[in-house]
Image (spheres, rainbow, N blue to C red):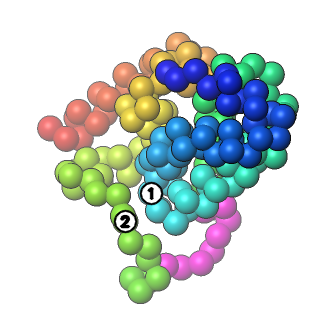
Amino acid sequence: MTDFSADVKLAMNGNTKAFARLYSLVYKDLYHIALYSLRSPHDACDVVSDTVLDAFCTIHKLRDEKAFRNWIMRILSAKIKQKQRDYFSDTTVLTDENEPENEFDFENLELKEAMEKLDPQDRLILSLSAIDGYTSEEISQICDINANTIRSRIARIKKRLRLELS
């Protein structure tokens, strides 16, 4: 993991260039996690934008400069959960003409289908683990779930995906 301390200290004091440097280090990870969790490029962009805006407005509240990455991922996690709740409250019916195009290229259609069968929380956990390489302790802080539970869920998710793909 990268040490963000120097730029975080500057950003906490209002330095926008320092915040931009921080953003440039994490934006791809934020987007990939959001995309895996929401399965919509447009929603993923919206969630990442909301996350960055909240982080920029509240970075002065960050207590530990070294915790920047986990802190912004917790914000992202909350935004993803909110967007997922919006899915259930939105009654708009999508047709083929207004269905979003999937810009993320899944090399394996079966993998995409297996991922779509996972519940949103499991997709988020798997994304954090597999894409960004977060440890179970880090994921537990981001998702506010016990680290042992995270390890168990990851094992169950992987087993389920293996069964689906075999």
User: How many residues crowd around disc 1 within 10 Å: few (fewer than 14), some, or many (20 or more)?
Assistant: many
Q: Is residue 75 magenta?
A: no
Question: Separation of disc 1 and disc 2 at Cα?
Answer: 8 Å
| Dot 2: element | loop
Foreground residue, 70 or 86? 70
Q: Is residue 58 visible?
A: no
Q: Earlier in the sequence, mark 1 or mark 2?
A: 1
Horizontal and vertical percent position of residue 1: 49, 21
Identify whether 143 is placed above or below 78: above
Residue 148 on image: x %, y %: 53, 13
Image spot of residue 57 (x, y percent) = 81, 46
Count of numbered circles on the image: 2
Q: From which residue to which does the magenta span run? A: 85-94
Q: Three-letter amino acid code at disc 2? A: Asn
The image's mark for residue 89 is none
Q: In the visual, does 99 lie left or right of 107?
A: right
Image vertical order of residue 76 relative to residue 148, above or below:
below
Is residue 156 placed above or below 89 in the rendered structure? above
Residue carrying label 2: 102
Q: Residue at x 64, y 45 (%)?
A: 20
Q: Furthest-left residue in view?
A: 166
Q: Is residue 93 magenta?
A: yes
Q: Which x, y percent locates residue 111?
A: 25, 47
Q: Residue at x 67, y 30 (%)?
A: 7
At a point 60% along the width and 40% down the height, the residue shown is 21
CB of mark 1 within 8 Å of CB of mark 2? yes
How many C-alpha atoms fall within 10 Å of the one at disc 2: few (<14), some, or many (≥20)? few
The amino acid type of the residue labelled 1 equals: Arg
Name the residue beneath numbered marker 1: 39
